[in-house]
């Protein structure tokens, strides 16, 4: 749609004349914003007046010393910036929450039109904007010492009743009248209250009439706090920030914090408060909204539970807010190479925010003292053994929607390192230019030194040649090192982003795909990086070299240049012919490769089954069948690629022959020197080689498209907890009340329901056994509690809260789930036990192991808790593996336990022992215990017998035995006693 049509279709400008619309359209432009990019930064005027054509922007109110507050979204069709430009005052920050397209009128044009066009002023003066009202009410609320808890709702309510007055209007009685702008020379400021006798506000400023907003006092009084009300809370600054600017935080997309950002430090801050301030500063820089009270409560809870707050717990809080973090141990000299920001545990005393790294030192933000610059020598002296570092990246905090993994997303990772990228490109250009010295030197030696018998020029020419060669060697080495460093940084950043997103995908994503196929998709990340670094940059430099060579050839001989250019259409034709063929063969080859790799991963994962069932030979045959399909497809691709490459090389060689012949003819005709012949030979061969490599780029582009499609399959899949999860209410500490309400679930759209309209209530503190035949829905039932699966119908409630409407992390932190096939990882026994409690002390670990009856066998291992286990827990038996998984769950200290056949590999005596210890340890905690051994449930508070997705029997053990139903029948079958269900007694 044309710009004039977009402007004319907007409600604000619908009544303006066509000539004015056309004037606007002539100077308008489209502004594209990615997720997290600002249109208007808090504390700054907008770049112009803008019509939001596509996407959504989030209104953010930034207060000194606090994170931004969201005031809702702006949708397509809305105009932005008019009132801010009219008033000459900054308003709310406007940040893209989705990819946005805006039609922008430059600020100078917008102000000029407001000054010159009464109809436009009349349209903009129809009513105050929410952004304008928010800035005025913030001044009024601060003057009253109050703040609304739900500012968006209250502003929207006031906006519906507010009036916009002009210079000729009388101030209405019973209204709060606030001057909006522009600022008057007499000192009248936006937010000042006007009385009936106020003067000096009606005059025009900057050729614009004043804007005055009147709000009914009745509406304001309705918002004042009543007795016992919390609609407005006292205004306090509970969140002092580090006195730093976000530009120093290392984010590419920085935003100013405003003049109030440089607040005072807190000299008495303890470690929890220091961590709080660092997290808050990071959220401020990325405009992430957080609850100060919730964050401080979380940090205090961690400190109380573990006895001390450490960096891993700070990292978990940042991860919950959407950042990517990575804890590591670093020496002082390594800090200078870190990309800020990072949180430091400095000398075991403070939690600090690393603001900037320099070659000679680092700048840190100390919550007690403010910014401090330390030299590396001083840092090394204070921390000779190094210090703990938590590297922080914006992660999903920098995006509000599922990220599209296109080439732009990948190239943006390179743009974060402009210095290194510039060095790679610049050194490549210099390298290519210095490479031109050889052919030109050969030409000079032959034509000047030899032909004219002038040996005095030989030494200078050789000196230049040797110097260029040495410099080229140094530049080539430096370029290789910088390229490797840049590639590593991009690999780490993008690899972390992909794996972070992969781990947030829901369980059905992994169950519906082969492991090998997922690994193949993820590994395409490195194929893309190799293409960009090795081919795109290389071919780009080849193009530059080609242009330089053409210029040099043209000065030597225009005829030779024209002959060289005649090769270009031939090369383009070869690529156009081969491109679709290569693309089709690549897709086939990659599909077969993923199939072969997936089957091999399955074999390696199930090697115990392969060997015990004695089908190694058949397994090898099946893998060979898949692999031969891949090799055949790869051979077809190689044959086609070879044909195209050889055709290109043949064309290049024939070009050399033609050029040589033409050059010799020109020499005989005295139109070309012998030295020029040698120069042309060298230059033309390099030019043709560049063209051949450019032809090879086509195959790389085909592979790139396939690789981007593979990585997009991961990155564009919806995570189980999207951006809206951060806006959900965190689950408070659980009592343990559980309720299923008309829950239905099935794994596919065509499979039968495993749960069908199930209703169930469990009281807090009950120990509930769940039994039934295989396929009755027991495991499915409990996996709905912590949202491993989502029900198609119905809801699950914990303590009366819908589990689908709480923060996922807060839910799974309090639910301890141990499946039948619990997994142990390669590492020591201690590392496996502390997997989700990395800072647990040894006393707590031993206590958890005792509860799971694991301490005795752990001590009997060769190195006790330091014994290393193999992949998937190799080195311990199945029963020992289950007890270690139980101990890990006990160490987590959940408030609701789910044991899904978690003791199936234990003998009866050990299972009874574990059962008794768990009951004692988690007395008063809700426990759901799925088992096939009914003899362990004699003391359970309640037993549920399931069949075909329904609970058909419910009661204590004695009650169900007297009922003489399915439970009693299965019980007597297990103990080996015949049972007559008609008589309800032993036969």
Image (cartoon, helix red, strand yellow):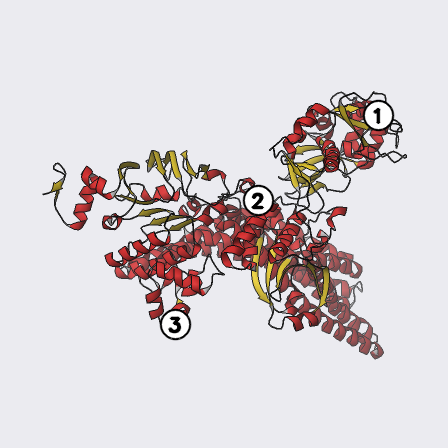
> Looking at this view, is 778 or 440 the one in front?
778
Nearer to us in this view, 741 or 642: 741
| Residue highlighted by disc 2 | 404
Q: Are marks 1 and 2 in contact (CB under 8 Å)?
A: no
Q: Earlier in the sequence, mark 2 or mark 3?
A: 2
Which residue is farthest front? 227
Crowding around mark 1 (Cα neighbors within 10 Å: few <14, some 14 to 19, many 20+) is few
- Locate residue 825, reporting x and y percent: 41, 61
Q: Quadrant of residue 95?
A: top right
Using the image, determine if residue 571 lies above or below residue 177.
below
State which quadrant residue 477 falls in: bottom right
Is label 3 or label 1 in front? 3
Q: What residue sits right under mark 1 in the picture?
A: 117
Residue 131 image-quadrant placement:
top right
Label of residue 521 in the image:
none
Q: Marks 1 and 3: in contact by CB < 8 Å?
A: no
The residue furthest left is 987
Work out which quarter of the rendered image holds the C terminus and state it.
top left
Q: Nearer the viewer, mark 2 or mark 3?
A: 3
**Percent position (x, y) of residue 489?**
61, 60
Examine the rendered structure and indicate whether residue 112 appears above or below residue 241. above
**Kind of element beneath mark 3:** loop
The tag on residue 863 is 3
Q: Is residue 740 visible?
A: yes
Dot 2 falls on a residue whose secondary structure is loop
Looking at the rendering, in which quadrant would you find the N terminus?
Answer: top right
Query: Position of 918 compared to 554: left or right?
Result: left
Q: Is residue 741 left or right of residue 561?
A: left
Left or right, 802 with reference to 659? left
Mark 1 or 2: in front is 1
Q: Earlier in the sequence, mark 3 or mark 1?
A: 1
């Amino acid at each position: 749609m044309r710009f004039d049509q977009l402007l004319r279709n907007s409600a604000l400008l619908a009544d303006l004349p066509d000539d004015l619309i056309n004037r606007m359209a002539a100077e308008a432009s489209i502004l594209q914003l990615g997720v997290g990019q600002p249109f208007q930064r808090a504390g700054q005027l907008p770049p112009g007046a803008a019509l939001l054509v596509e996407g959504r922007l989030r209104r953010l109110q930034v207060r000194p010393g606090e994170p931004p507050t969201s005031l809702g979204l702006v949708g397509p069709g809305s105009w932005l910036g008019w009132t801010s430009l009219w008033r000459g005052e900054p308003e709310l920050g406007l940040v893209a929450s989705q990819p946005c397209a805006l039609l922008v009128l430059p600020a100078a044009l917008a102000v000029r039109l407001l000054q010159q066009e009464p109809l436009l002023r009349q349209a903009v003066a129809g009513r105050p904007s929410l952004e304008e009202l928010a800035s005025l009410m913030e001044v009024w609320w601060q003057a009253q010492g109050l703040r609304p808890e739900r500012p968006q709702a209250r502003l929207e309510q006031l906006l519906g009743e507010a009036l916009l007055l002009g210079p000729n209007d009388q101030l209405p009685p019973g209204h709060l009248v606030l001057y909006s702008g522009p600022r008057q020379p007499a000192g009248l400021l936006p937010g000042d209250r006007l009385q009936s006798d106020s003067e000096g506000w009606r005059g025009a400023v900057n050729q614009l009439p004043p804007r005055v907003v009147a709000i009914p006092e009745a509406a304001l009084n309705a918002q004042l706090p009543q007795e016992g009300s919390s609609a407005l809370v006292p205004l306090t600054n509970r969140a002092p920030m580090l006195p730093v600017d976000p530009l120093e935080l290392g984010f590419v997309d920085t935003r100013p914090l405003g003049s109030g950002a440089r607040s005072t430090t807190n000299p008495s801050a303890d470690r929890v408060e220091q961590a709080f301030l660092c997290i808050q500063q990071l959220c401020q820089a990325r405009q992430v909204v957080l609850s100060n009270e919730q964050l401080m409560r979380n940090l205090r809870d961690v400190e109380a539970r573990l006895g001390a707050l450490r960096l891993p717990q700070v990292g978990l809080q940042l991860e919950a807010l959407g950042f990517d973090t990575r804890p590591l141990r670093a020496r002082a000299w390594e800090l200078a190479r870190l990309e800020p920001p990072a949180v430091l545990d400095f000398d075991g005393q403070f939690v600090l925010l690393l603001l900037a790294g320099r070659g000679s030192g680092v700048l840190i933000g100390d919550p007690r003292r403010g910014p401090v610059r330390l030299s590396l020598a001083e840092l090394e002296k204070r921390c000779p053994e190094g210090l703990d570092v938590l590297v922080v990246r914006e992660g999903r905090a920098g995006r509000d929607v599922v990220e599209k993994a296109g080439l732009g997303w990948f190239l943006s990772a390179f743009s974060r390192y402009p210095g290194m990228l510039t060095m790679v490109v610049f050194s490549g250009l210099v390298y290519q230019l210095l490479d031109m010295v050889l052919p030109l030197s050969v030409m000079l030696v032959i034509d000047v030194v030899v032909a004219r018998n002038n040996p005095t020029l030989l030494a200078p020419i050789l000196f230049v040649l040797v110097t260029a060669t040495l410099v080229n060697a140094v530049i080539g080495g430096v370029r290789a090192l910088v390229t490797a460093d840049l590639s590593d940084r991009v690999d780490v950043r993008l690899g972390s982003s992909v794996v972070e997103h992969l781990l947030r995908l829901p369980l059905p994503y992994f169950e519906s795909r082969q492991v090998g196929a997922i690994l193949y998709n993820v590994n395409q990340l490195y194929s893309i990086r190799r293409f960009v670094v090795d081919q795109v940059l290389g071919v780009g430099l080849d193009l530059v070299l080609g242009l330089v060579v053409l210029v040099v050839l043209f000065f030597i001989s225009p005829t030779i240049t024209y002959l060289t250019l005649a090769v270009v259409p031939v090369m383009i034709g070869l690529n156009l012919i081969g491109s679709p063929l290569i693309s089709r063969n690549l897709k086939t080859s990659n599909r077969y490769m993923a199939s072969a790799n997936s089957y091999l991963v399955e074999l390696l994962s199930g090697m115990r089954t392969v060997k015990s069932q004695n089908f190694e030979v058949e397994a090898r045959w099946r893998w060979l069948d898949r692999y031969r399909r891949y090799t055949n497809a790869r051979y077809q691709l190689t044959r086609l690629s070879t044909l195209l490459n050889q055709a290109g090389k043949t064309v290049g060689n024939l070009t050399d022959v033609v050029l040589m012949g033409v050059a010799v003819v020109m020499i005989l005709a005295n139109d070309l020197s012998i030295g020029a012949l040698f120069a042309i030979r060298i230059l033309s061969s390099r030019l043709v080689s560049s063209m051949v490599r450019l032809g090879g780029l086509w195959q790389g582009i085909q592979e790139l498209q396939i690789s981007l499609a593979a990585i997009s399959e991961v990155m564009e899949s919806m995570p189980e907890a999207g951006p809206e999860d951060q806006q959900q209410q965190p689950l408070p500490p659980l009592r343990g009340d559980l309720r299923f309400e008309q829950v239905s679930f099935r794994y596919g759209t065509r499979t039968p329901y495993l749960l069908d309209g199930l209703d169930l209530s469990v009281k807090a503190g009950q120990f509930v056994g769940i039994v039934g035949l295989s396929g009755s829905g027991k495991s499915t039932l409990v996996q709905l509690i912590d949202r491993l699966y989502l029900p198609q119908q119905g809801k699950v409630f914990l303590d009366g809260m819908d589990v689908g409407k709480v923060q996922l992390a807060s839910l799974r932190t309090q639910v301890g789930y141990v499946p039948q096939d619990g997994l142990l990882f390669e590492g020591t026994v201690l590392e496996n036990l502390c997997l989700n409690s990395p800072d647990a002390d040894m006393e707590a670990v031993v206590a958890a192991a005792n509860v799971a009856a694991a301490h005795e066998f752990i001590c009997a291992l060769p190195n006790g808790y330091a014994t290393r286990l193999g992949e998937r827990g190799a080195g311990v038996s199945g029963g020992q593996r289950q007890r270690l998984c139980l101990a890990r769950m006990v160490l987590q200290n959940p408030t609701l336990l789910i044991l899904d056949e978690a003791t199936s590999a234990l003998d009866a005596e050990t299972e009874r022992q574990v059962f008794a210890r768990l009951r004692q340890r988690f007395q008063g905690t809700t426990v759901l215990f799925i088992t096939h051994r009914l003899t362990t449930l004699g003391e359970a508070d309640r037993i549920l017998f399931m069949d075909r997705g329904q609970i058909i029997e419910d009661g204590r053990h004695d009650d169900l035995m007297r009922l003489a139903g399915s439970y009693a029948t299965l019980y007597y079958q297990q103990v080996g006693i015949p049972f007559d269900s008609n008589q309800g007694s032993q036969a």
